[in-house]
Amino acid sequence: MQTVILNNGVEMPILGFGVYQIPAEDTERAVSEALAAGYRLLDTAAAYGNEEAVGHAIKSSGIPREELFVTTKLWVQDTPAEDNARRAFETSLSKLGLEHLDLYLMHQPFGDVYGQWRAMEALNREGAAKAIGVANFYPDRLVDLIVNNEITPAVNQIETHPFFQRADYQGLMREHGVQIQSWGGFAEGRNDLFANPILAEIGKEHGKSVAQVVLRWLTQRGVVAIPKSVRAERMAENFDVFDFRLTDEQMARIATLDTGTSQFFDHRDPVMVTRLGGHRIDG
Ligand code: NAP
């Protein structure tokens, strides 16, 4: 598996498995199948409600802990966020049945972001979270967090797919040493992604599916990808993307698909800030 080296020297697989929207009762099976298919990076979140099931699959796999890269995410916390975030971290760790996390992400740029980040910095210094990062931070929020804190996020996990490519933002993140990670790499199939004629044509040129073209395109750009599927055959298909290379001309054709806007919503939209930023989960 190809890897990227994060800004603190931690090594992260460039391709992993995401479990958003997998119901808790299906998650242990899905993660077990993903591990059997070869995935070693698992991406969950307190908000997904399936950390325990991910933990069960990890335990029953028998795979040595050091071969796995496990990410979970801190949901929005009230003040005193430093105490609450530490408690939430410990709850996640215990649900996962782990002694440490490889990556702990702040899930949303909302609430007491600075208190949350200070708690995450402490967890990182203690070695309980080998790397810490953020998700859904737009450039202004990310740079503000960087210039006003000691530890620069190792990762920013953001919506990134052929219709919202984030190339300029990836350049800015690179300048600051922040690794881009894609969520929704298939745009969850929106805008008819799996039937897109340009992606399908490029797939035909390599004998690969649209999904494989998208994952190759992301990883070839240095973007960490975490496709989700509940089907073993798609997990295998999505993992089989390192035996071909897209040409510059094919990369340029995919670049034409960029709309520069989200297929979901904007994290700066006041309606969404109210909805997500005011939502609390048990943890
Ligand atoms: P996604 O990976 O873009 O798309 C998943 C969808 O694609 C599912 O409907 C899946 O269906 C289908 N699919 C998967 N492989 C396929 C294939 N080879 N051919 C055809 N269809 C295929 O969506 P996502 O789950 O939203 O994003 C990936 C991960 O990113 C999540 O699981 C989560 O870990 C993370 N994420 C993070 C955030 C955040 O705020 N930080 C937000 C969203 C997601 P089946 O399952 O039926 O195969």
Image (cartoon, grey):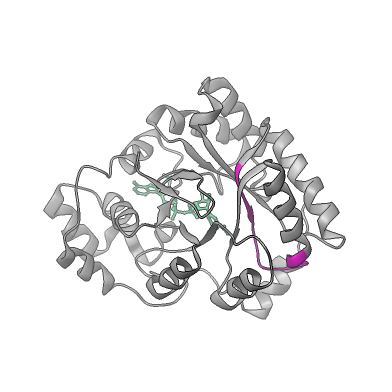
Left/right of residue 91 with respect to residue 185 in the rendered view: right
Q: Nearer the viewer, residue 58 or 1?
A: 1
Residue 282 seen in this snapshot? no
Residue 76 position in % (x across, y down): 74, 60
Q: How many marks?
A: 0
- Above or below — where is 61 with respect to 214? above
* Quarter of the view holding residue 101: top right
Q: Nearer the viewer, residue 221 or 23?
A: 221
Residue at the extreme right: 80
Quadrant for the N terminus, please. top left
- Above or below — where is 6 with respect to 67? below
Q: Nearer the viewer, residue 11 or 70?
A: 11
Left/right of residue 143 with respect to residue 229 in the rendered view: right
Residue at 29 percent across and 72 percent down: it is 257
Residue 222 position in % (x across, y down): 36, 57
Residue at 34 percent across and 40 percent down: it is 239
Reply yes or no: does residue 111 show up in magenta. yes
Residue at 40 percent across and 75 percent down: it is 168
Residue 64 seen in this snapshot? yes
Residue at 67 percent across and 63 percent down: it is 150
* Quarter of the view holding residue 231: top left
Residue 36 position in % (x across, y down): 42, 27
Residue at the extreme left: 205
Reply yes or no: does residue 178 show up in magenta. no
Q: Which residues are magenta?
A: 102-114
